[in-house]
Image (cartoon, grey):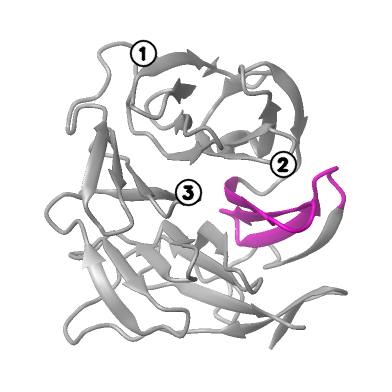
Amino acid sequence: MTFGSDNYTYTVQENWWTLPEGWAFGWIPGVACDSQDRVYVYSRSEHPLMVFDREGHFLEAWGDDILVDAHGIYIDDEDNVFCTEREDHCIRKFNKHGELVLTIGTPGQPGANDGDPFNLPTDLVVTRTGDLYITDGYGNARVHHYDAEGNHIKSWGEWGTGPSQFELSHCVRIDRHDRLWVCDRTNDRIQLFDLDGNYLEERAGLAKPDTIFFDPKEDVVYIAELDQQLSIYTLDGDLITQWGGRQKSEKPGEFIACPHGIWMDSRGDLYVGEVQYDARLTKFVRNK
């Protein structure tokens, strides 16, 4: 079955992975690919971070005794893997060999006051200089800026529906113009900021945006939306194509539950993980 339109059409590939005997996926809030197109599946399961090759062959598992509550995942240009641990109130950084090299926040301990990092954080992005921007969205309405060593620089955001306000700051990414895009999920929008946290504009009318991914070769953003929708837009906000229909469906390529995590590999194939249902990770192979 084919989805999308024009130059952005995809063939769905369900259940493309093979798990070790007796292993299982739970909800899959996060998925990411490294420079070798290995696929990192961050799930709420006994083995929270599993690594596969692009054909779906299992390679290894990381962090079984470290990771507690999967949410956002990000892989930087050096193949460091950052896991945002929602209910553990911290960020875990692994190097490309799977070794834990940095923890930001105190595991198991939320910030003492409203706005203090972290209280059920959601996701992060790494800049070209190694700085981190972290969305802290379930217990706080904040975006936090840290340096590469994990030192706090600044924070911004408050509860609400206006500019620089959030009801759920759920994901943050950076486009090629060095603009921060922050998914304000419950407000059905994405807010854009400069790297100093100054508000620029918003993209409204979305279906509860969960996670986004920027095409490294084209001025295109891919958006996984909680209300059963995947959308592809230009950076200027023009809709290219979308599917899902904002309704639950058991048809291959549509969404039984809620699209949550999204990433693209070097060949342009998309990986979408869902929450509120176990073992939902769909691969959309881009048609050439």
From mark 1 to mark 2, how far is it between C-alphas? 32 Å
Q: CA distance from mark 2 to mark 3?
A: 15 Å
Region of the chain picked out in magenta, as a range: 209-238
Asked if labels 1 and 3 touch by Cβ distance under 8 angstroms, the answer is no
Q: Is residue 285 above or below residue 162?
A: below
Residue 83 picture location, percent across and down: 34, 47
Can you identify the residue that label 3 sits on? Answer: 76
Q: Amino acid at mark 3?
A: Asp
Q: Specify the quadrant that holds the C terminus.
A: bottom right
Residue 223 in the image: state x and y as whole percent.
65, 54
Instruction: Describe the element under mark 2 as helix, strand or loop.
Output: loop
Residue under label 2, please give it. Answer: 176
| Above or below for 237 versus 144 | below
| Side of 65 relative to 2 (left or right) | left
- In magenta stretch: residue 29: no
The amino acid pointed to by label 2 is Arg
Magenta-colored stretch includes residue 212: yes
Q: Position of residue 176 (x, y in %)?
A: 72, 41
* Residue matched to label 1: 114
From this view, report whether residue 63 is shown above or below residue 24.
above
Quadrant in the rendering for residue 228: bottom right
Locate the N terminus by quadrant. bottom right
Mark closest to the chain's N terminus, 2 or 3: 3
How dense is the environment of label 3, judged by Cα within 10 Å: few (below 14), some, or many (20 and up)? some
Which secondary structure, mark 1? loop
